[in-house]
Image (spheres, rainbow, N blue to C red):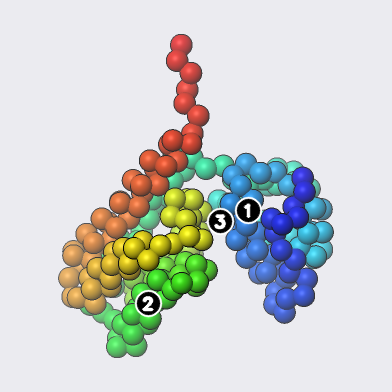
Amino acid sequence: MALEGRVRSVAAANSSAVDLVTAEIRRAVLTGALPAGQQFSIQDLAAQLGVSHIPIREALRRLESQGLIVLRQARAASVAPLSSSDLEAIYRLRYLIELPLAGASAGTRSADQIARLDELLELSRDEDPEVAWQGHYDFHEALVHPASNDWDDRLLHTLWMAAERYTHLVFDPTRITEAERARRYETHRILREAAVADDAAAMTQALRQHLKRNEERILTHIRALEPHPQAH
């Protein structure tokens, strides 16, 4: 398949080739430039990105572990399909891991950590969509950071990345109105207030409600796209 216009060359960038390739393919998947189910060859991808096959294969292995890519053969891959059952599994694990960590973090932050939370809250409504989405991602990380360890972080980053493509599909990352920007800010401001208060139960409940609303909205969208079984 032709990849022109779907992924951008990273040959001239000054950073780890694997990191750059991973970031670019992930961007293409999250924005829909590489849509769910899209098949592509490693050779074509290497040519379009301007790098060798070695960082491509390593990047695809990383993305496969995040649930974004399916490696079909030694020389081919495809974008993982979207499904409501996968989304439900992602959120089920988020509830199990993320909620107790957020609760345990409530009221434990230093002044610097609170300032960082406020900074990320502001970034999450930035007019630049990429800045806003990164701010949103980092904000959720900051909600659990005081109580999380390395294993918690590894598992949650995998879940957040897997959930993000569904979130991008429903909450359009490129066209955000002022009203929508304000709505998103307010929902996360509530989480910020709960995070700095010394009330683990309130923090857990606030985050549960936030995640549940998003899950239900995304599920409604995904289920409408899924094929319905034929009646017999």
Q: N-terminal of the two: label 2 or label 3?
A: 3
Frontmost of labels 3 and 1 is 1
Q: Secondary structure at mark 1?
A: loop
Pointer 3: what residue?
30
Nearer to me, 127 or 96: 127
Amino acid type shown at disc 3: Leu
Pointer 1: what residue?
33
What residue lies at 38% left-to-right and 81% top-to-bottom?
Answer: 119
Image spot of residue 24 (x, y percent)? 65, 63
Q: Left or right: where does residue 2 sit relative to residue 86? A: right
The answer to whether residue 148 shows anywhere in this view is no
Placement of 228 over or under 21, stated as above or below: above
Nearer to me, 31 or 151: 31
Query: Gap in Å between the C-alphas at discs 3 and 1?
Result: 8 Å
Quarter of the N terminus within the rendering:
top right
Pointer 2: what residue?
122
Query: Gap in Å between the C-alphas at discs 2 and 3?
Result: 22 Å
Please tell me how many numbered marks the rendered image carries. Answer: 3
What residue lies at 80% left-to-right and 53% top-to-bottom?
Answer: 44
